[in-house]
Amino acid sequence: MKHLQYYDVPISVGDLEIGMNVVSLDRPWEETNFLMQGFIIKSQDEIYQLQAQCEQVFVQVKIEDIDAFKRKLEAKPKKPDGKTHRPGVDGPVTETPVHYTDTIVFEDAVEASRVTFDDARSMANNVLDGLRFSRNIKMDDCRGAVEEIVDSVLANKDALRFLSQIKNKDNYTAEHSMNVCILSATFARHLGLLDFEIKTIALCGLLHDVGKANIPLDILNKPGRFNSGEARMMAQHTTFGRNILMSMEGSHRHAVDVAHSHHERIDGKGYPRALSEDAIPYYAKLVSVVDAYDAMTSDRVYGTPKSSEFALDILLKNAGTQFDEALVKEFVKCIGVYPVGCLVELKSGEIAVVVGSNDLDPASSKILIVSDDKKQPNPFERIVNLATENVEGKSIVKELANGSFGFDVKKYIQKDLSLYQS
């Protein structure tokens, strides 16, 4: 009886095909999400996951087939630079975006997501506090929190983003990390990325600023402008973040990339390495857009929050120089004209909070009216759906920065929206 003999052949993840027998990876199996140590590829999704987590794997090939196998690999078309596509560096792993639809209505999703939001807030705090006290990041806990965040975002694109407007300037760094995590997942969903990619990007968002744990608190929380020495120290948070994540057990290369590179610029004038355009990892480009948007729209010790419209305008003005132009354009579409949680002024002079987006007609969103026409608090707050109710003077005129006329959206987000239903 003849015994078949095999070679274990190294192969780039860009050359994988369905039917190949993967026998080992370029990293320990326990550092990946694969349950089996060795398997035959049965779906394109398994190829995508291998591409996202590895650069090279070993596949088993019969000895008599080895020459034909190598010729087939050599005949495969390569990119112009001869390099294999690396997901997360060059872009998404699939060229066919996934179309996601909400499975839970907004009001129900908000209430269902409150525990997830509170858990995410606690996790972001624990990460930074733990590092300041020389404790390692508990990556399993981080991934668990991210799983819940992504599940919520996939169920309803607006619920967690609405809750993320509950911001506390005295705890800005941790809450900023949580908000970037949530908004990065929302943006990745909008881009139609695959489920596991969205989770990877959300984890990158959560950990993008871990290096700030090594910045002295008197600098981190300084209310005024930094002097040159303080600015140099603050800029080191990207390198500190890289070093923290690289010192941890396991492989977290995408999180390392984002922590190290989210302040690089397309024009090569960023830091810490002055990378430009294609040299900047794709996930870092994505998170940098989200990072800037959340920073501008947040209440910080050294600045008042700007309106979403203002922040998006700044992103557009800096597209192609500071930020990736294509990503900025998509991000503007993702956020929309009047995003949930923003404060708006109506034609009647009243003030309202947007509690339901309308992608087809932003001026006809669902709103919670919180003032009278003199901009005084209205004790009879109620929700009006401008798309279905023809109410005189209730169309949206413009967005207002949170805090305008003394109205803070946090007050209304913390309440059960069903109490306001008309």
Image (spheres, rainbow, N blue to C red):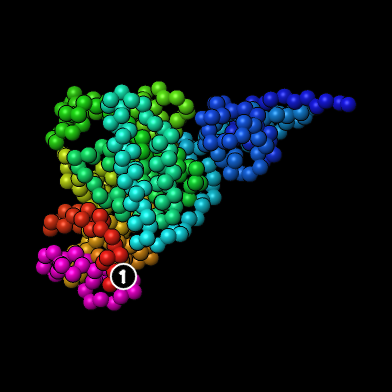
Which image quadrant is residue 246 in? top left
Q: Amino acid at mark 1?
A: Asn
Query: Where does label 1 land, which residue?
Result: 385
Please say if 88 is above or below 250.
below
Does the magenta run of residues contain 360?
Answer: no
Does the magenta run of residues contain 391?
Answer: yes
Q: Report whether 3 appears left or right of 61.
A: right
Could you say where residue 77 lies in the image, as x and y percent from the top left? 63, 36
Magenta residues, start to end: 369-395
Of all residues shown, which one is farthest toward the right? 1
Residue at 40 percent across and 62 percent down: it is: 105
Categorize mark 1 by other alpha carbons within 10 Å: few (<14), some (14-19), many (20+).
many
Q: Report whether 130 appears left or right of 400.
A: right
Please say if 67 is above or below 99.
above
Does residue 235 appear in the picture of this structure? Answer: no
Residue at 53 percent across and 42 percent down: it is: 93
Q: Report whether 308 appears left or right of 249.
A: left
Disc 1 secondary structure class: strand
